[in-house]
Amino acid sequence: MTSTDVRKDAEDSGPSGYAAARLRLLTEEARSGPPRRAALAELTDEWLTGLFTAAAEGLQGLRGVSLVAVGGYGRGELSPRSDLDLLLLHDGSDSGAVAALADRLWYPVWDLGLALDHSVRTPSEARKVSGEDLKVQLGLLDARHLAGDLGLTAGLRTAVLADWRNQAPKRLPELQELCAERAERQGELQYLLEPDLKEARGGLRDATALRAVAASWLADAPREGLDDARRRLLDVRDALHLTTGRATDRLALQEQDQVAAELGLLDADTLLRQVYEAARVVSYASDVTWREVGRVLRSRAVRPRLRAMLGGGKPAPERSPLAEGVVEQDGEVVLARAARPDRDPVLPLRAAAAAAQAGLPLSLHAVRRMAAAARPLPTPWPAEAREQLVTLLGSGRPTIDVWEALEAEGLITHLLPDWERVRCRPQRNAVHIWTVDRHLIETAVRASEFTRRVSRPDLLLVSALLHDIGKGWPGDHSVAGEIIAKDVAARIGFDRADVAVLATLVRHHLLLVDTATRRDLEDPATVRSVAEAVGTQSTLELLHALTESDALATGPAAWSSWRGSLVADLVKRVAAVLAGDAPEEPEAGAPTAEQERLAIEAFRTGGPVLSLRAQTEPPAEVSEGESPAEGAGEPEPLGVELLIAVPDQPGVLPAVAGVLAMHRLTVRTAELRALDLPDGVEGAVLLLDWRVAAEYGSLPQAARLRADLVRALDGSLDIAGRLAERDAAYPRRRGVVAPPARVTVASAASRHATVIEVRAQDAPGLLHRIGRALEDAGVRVRSMHVSTLGSNAVDAFYVTNGGGVPLPGAEATAVARKLEETLRA
């Protein structure tokens, strides 16, 4: 139907002519989407203009009146069953004639069975009502002249826009609150199986709110992809109206196949995925926009006071370092001025981990800059990239917003291409409340609460991220997921043993709950089969935590105390079968020549001796025929190996750990052991082998580290006081609330010592606090094995009493309890 056809059909201003033309337009298969909505609005404009003209002439050429389209109709977005939002605007000179005109306009609309939202007001009345009712004001922002006095309409539009801009500091917070209340009632469009396309968060109402924010000139939404997302939601609503014949915005399950067919899509899952993708764009744009509105309003409120205090001028925004190349500014995480995303492929993960740990949003500009300059990570990933991913996944609730910011700009699929198949994928299961991708992130968030229960929190968090990755493929998703998990785990740099554990966790992530709820646990064959599938005690521990995390992230119906008790009972039985595999304390290998040299030097001088040596990974290989990327062929830095030899004496561990914390050195791994000197030399030396990295900036000089260590050992350096002063100098960020530290005694782990395991949130000075607590308890650390897995510290301390024998059971428990109380204080 062409514009000429529209005008011809509309020449008959009666209902029958318009109704016939409208029916023809809506049933015409060749036109859909924006062209059909625009044509329907044009057809309706012509009809209503004809009605207005005829009625005005019948009232002796009534003047000072105009007909105005507002709201969705004002935007020209008429869906097949949309309301007609109309305002009859008049100058107040002849209210009786205006009332008669209104009757001649509204009754023909009602006669056709069309929904009508109408009002009759003067410009001053319209402005007064809009000042009292935010929804009225939003509708007037889209006012469009249809017929009558154009000057009257133009004057109102100008006045309403001026009012909106003048009142923006007050009205925008009201609008934000309105959006939040609606989201609370309706849920998030991008996850609902039966979403409301208009009212749910990320729907058409939110898209309209973003237009209103832009009209205020106070802030603007990210434009890229927003118009297309809005168009897709409107297209789905059009198809929903046509297939149901009703003015509905709820996409019910029983109607999704018909709507998909109307849009020419493969099936209902394809339809939902498109809806979710569009909603995700709108939701992310809303988050960014409201954050910017808040920043602008805070700036406006603070700036006059600052100018008065500083005597004028604009103060420079404060920038606080968070990680290498990453700083906090004005409540957001941004890139440092010296950051080079084109030369630093780990930067997106480092920035994301820093943002999640600090509980701060990633700035839109930073994410887009990193996405534009993104370089592929080498295969396998460098250790830092893997550690930053683990830190991001282990940061709790803030992980979700940071992950969504990366995903909005395509960085997640850039880092993990297999993510594309699960992105926005619906789950047609009444138990599941999330899409596949959001469920995976929710599982990681839940798993972060259980990192104290497992010896390898990094494997727990990565298995949480990957456990349903096979749902994008045909067949059993656990079988498909095992194959994908092997590939992903190897690509991101786990060794063969860890890859095998991750593959086992993904393959059997449903094993415990299925067995516990569907099999006879009294049957020994049932327990043996689970033990054979799991293989080791540590894998069982991980699988137990993953099972609970997965269920809690699925929805309230997926987990209960009853299910939890069944699974716990099964785990206890399987652990008994696997008990014969409990590891013994590993025997220490012979010292290297370098270690022996340092030990003899320490004994000779009677003081600490240390060496610093950079650690590197081999360069990534380049396949034949490929061009090496910039920087390829260079070794990847892992940090610095710090070897320290100290004559055996009390207080070595807290002294060394405290000095490293003072110098802002992050401990990645650490080992301590007593080293016997060569034959003929009496005495023992403690050897500490650490891998450290600077939090930001460069490493301190070895001479300075040694000087501080000497002072710490002789008691002239107050480490605890210096660390407390530094903590007090920096305001505590709200950040992520980590689960409390957990300290346990590993029974039967060693014949020669008592093994105390500490699982806690990694933080500056943590190892110093642990060392001091163990010293205060009067135990000697015979050896230790410290590892930092993302943001989690997993430390094992082999301790003895003064006589060099393991602690009695009650004493060991008391030491562990006291240490846990110290770390939780």
Image: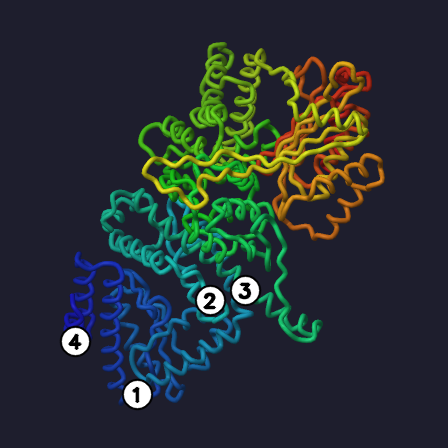
Q: Position of residue 167 (x, y in %)?
A: 53, 73
Q: Could you tell me which secondary element the residue under label 1 belongs to?
A: loop
Determine the CA span between mark 2 and mark 3: 10 Å
Label 1 amino acid?
Leu
Tell me if residue 28 comes above or below residue 357 in the rendering: below
Q: Which residue is mark 3?
A: 173
Q: Which residue is mark 1?
A: 62
Tell me if residue 7 can be seen. Answer: yes
Tell me if residue 177 can be seen. Answer: no
Please report whichever mark, 4 or 2, sits nearer to the chain's N-terminal start.
4
Q: Nearer the viewer, residue 554 or 121?
A: 554
Q: How many marks?
A: 4
Q: Which residue is mark 4?
A: 11
Please report whichever mark, 2 or 1, sits nearer to the chain's N-terminal start.
1
Determine the CA span between mark 4 and mark 3: 46 Å
Q: Badge 2: how crowded within 10 Å, few (<14), some, or many (20+)?
A: many
Q: Is residue 652 left or right of residue 338?
A: right
Label 2 amino acid?
Val
Q: Which residue is mark 2?
A: 213
Please report whichever mark, 2 or 3, sits nearer to the chain's N-terminal start.
3
